[in-house]
Amino acid sequence: MNKKLLLGAEAVAVAAIDAGISGVYAYPGTPSTEITTYIQNSAEAREKNIHSRWSANEKTAYEAALGMSYSGKRALICMKHVGLNVAADAFINSAITGCNGGMVLLVADDPSMHSSQNEQDTRMYGKFAYLPLLEPSNQQELYDAVKYAFDFSEKISLPIIVRVTTRLSHSRAVVVQSDKRPQNALNPSTQENSWILLPANARKNYANLLEKQTQLLEESEQSFLNKSIQGSGNIGVIAFGIAYNYAMEIKTTHALDCGVLKISHYPLPLKTIEAFVKNYKTIVIAEEGYPIYEELLPAYFPHTTFVGRLTGALPRMGELNPKLLGESLGITLPVHHASSDIVVPRPPQLCQGCGHRDLFEELNHILEKYEHKHVFSDIGCYTLGALPPFNTISTCVDMGASITMAKGAADAGLHPAICVIGDSTFTHSGMTGLLDAVNDESNITIIISDNSTTAMTGGQDSSGTGKLYDICKGIGVQPEHIHLVVPIKKNREHNIRILSQEIEYKGVSVIISQRECVQVAIRNQKKS
Amino acid sequence: MQKNYIIAGVGGQGILSMAAIIDVTAMNSGLYVKQAEVHGMSQRGGSVEAHLRISDSEIFSDIIPLGEADCIIATEPMEALRYIPFLKEHGTIITASKSLINCANYPDKEVLDKELQNKIHCITIDADAIALSCGSIKTSNIVILGAASHYLGIEEDQYIQAIETLFASKGADIVSMNICAFSKGREYKN
């Protein structure tokens, strides 16, 4: 018996290797990154020649996985919740094409927004695409669910979504591995009509997808991931995914007589729910995410009282925990030691020796003389330029938005229209925006703060390393308005001069402010 | 048997290594383990915490319920204080005495010490000094772990084994430095 102590994310990786994948496709994003890094570092994965190089973004990752599936082999795709917005076009349409080799999409949601800009719930996407979604509650279940998902995917010829949240992805427990499956042989799809989504084909495929829903529902009804624990009291809890852990924690610690129904497999198994609901007067709906089913269930069961996030029994937003589940069941957890009011927040900050620091100092100096001090920025370590002592940046919305927002602001007449984007974010979603700006001859100054890594998520390889100058030139930025600067103290005057001059140039200029990430430098030094 | 520990500190202080050592000892002792940790943004010099739960029966919640932590093990005193609502009534804090001040309005040292000592059974250790005597200040976290080990209900040789396993890839010197740090931490009397 092979026992391992694994993070939820690592359990996904091990399960995918054991399920016989030929490739993992992903772009780094907390809390999903460790899945791919585990596979990249696995000797077994190397031996099996499993593809694991990072993709430029989630959409390219999804499409490459779809191509691998088309060819008959199994592929895993990993991303954080907002990454699925980027991949959504490929994702939704892959439900219409269906798949050939097994295809599993792992999405890591981040309720409470520990490291994200929203807490969107991927279960919505499952419904939206009419695809099955699994939401395990612990590491062993996660391992088992991922392996099952590959089998199920091949059986039903559809991609399967597995949803985890930060708490499961970043929590460790002992996982027992089961049998290893061989990888699939090359076996390209011959169902060409199903892959060519011309309207006539798409209509047929969509009807086919709708027809499969009955089978998907049957699979949910008998899923090993759902579990019903009957209680003798008037209250039942329907706990979705990881909420089951908190419900059971409270039930067992406080010897409550409530029933608990765990739902971890969608589409929603209504018969299972009906059999449970009829035994109780009141049902607490505990969803780790949006109150999706709390909104729907009362219509199915008009004689039952449902409480949850919509009624105030649980908070409308944020991650659940034992305290909150306890309160929804009438239990107040004791606090023996009240919070101390001398404790102050300790926010994250840019590392000492980080090039973003020098860049922000240079920019702040330049902006002193302007009335409009706006810097459009993006997602990465440099977003910390929003905090003291810098307070430099004005926006952070979605990957790549810095360039296009600066362009729109310049269109509106704002000057200077400056943006700061990281190297990895630039190749993820910034290049197309740069093309818009070049074609429009927008009066913007783009600073690519290039630390040659995807730093925020722990220093993964960045797709554009060594290519940024050529990319910008190729997209059409005038070579005399592309500059390479090194943000260190002794270059400060020089860099300020270049930046000031390009801010005043009426057109697109790109300054590549290039200095290796200090964390990566330390790591490389240790290696050598 | 169920034990709950919060391990707290600042990004870069080795919180996750401390947790990993306890995890391995617990797994090798045949116990259930759950350990929730913080990655991502908070690692950039921000607060870092791990919730660690060990039990001889199934553990449900990855997060320790309020008021149920047996110990808070911290590499920084204000970080120890941050999590006190999780502490049991007669729980213990084991913390490094030295403050790491990288944020605004850090409390006055005397006020902080008083707050820690007045309310709770608290053991403070000059972990850096002990770590230095073992050859590297980087082993401070393991000194704290050594001092905390009395409260964790696991045999001493289990820790030594776990340290040997986890640090093996870093070479014999690092292993012996960490074993020294653990042992001296364990001998420490407040």
Image (cartoon, rainbow, N blue to C red):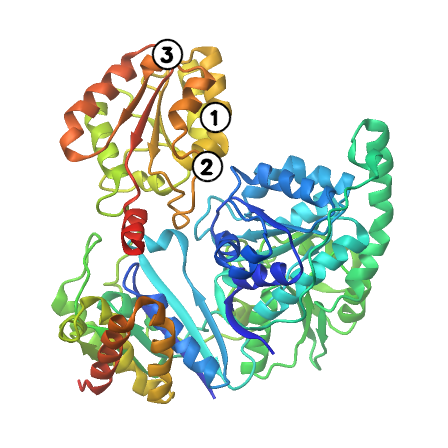
Viewer-nearest residue: A22 or B124: A22
Three-letter residue code for mark 3: Gly
Q: Name the chain under label 2.
A: A
Three-letter residue code for mark 1: Met
Sequence-wise first label, 2 or 3: 2
Residue contact between numbered discs 2 and 3, judged by CB atoms under 8 Å: no
Q: Nearer the viewer, mark 1 or mark 3?
A: 1
Viewer-nearest residue: A508 or A194: A194
Query: In whole angstroms, how far apart are the C-alphas of marks 1 and 3?
Result: 17 Å
Residue placed at 17% from the left, 23% from the top?
A494
Q: Horizontal placement of A66 versus A374: left or right?
A: right
- Check disc 2 and report the residue beneath it: A463
Q: Are marks 1 and 3 on the same chain?
A: yes
Q: Position of residue B84 (x, y in %)?
A: 32, 72
Q: Position of residue A230 (x, y in %)?
A: 72, 78
Q: Quadrant of residue B90?
A: bottom left
**Label 1 residue SS:** helix
- Check disc 3 and report the residue beneath it: A507
Q: Position of residue B105 (x, y in %)?
A: 19, 55
- Check disc 1 and report the residue beneath it: A431
Q: Horizontal placement of A471 versus A97: left or right?
A: left
Q: Position of residue A150 (x, y in %)?
A: 71, 57
**Label 2 residue SS:** loop
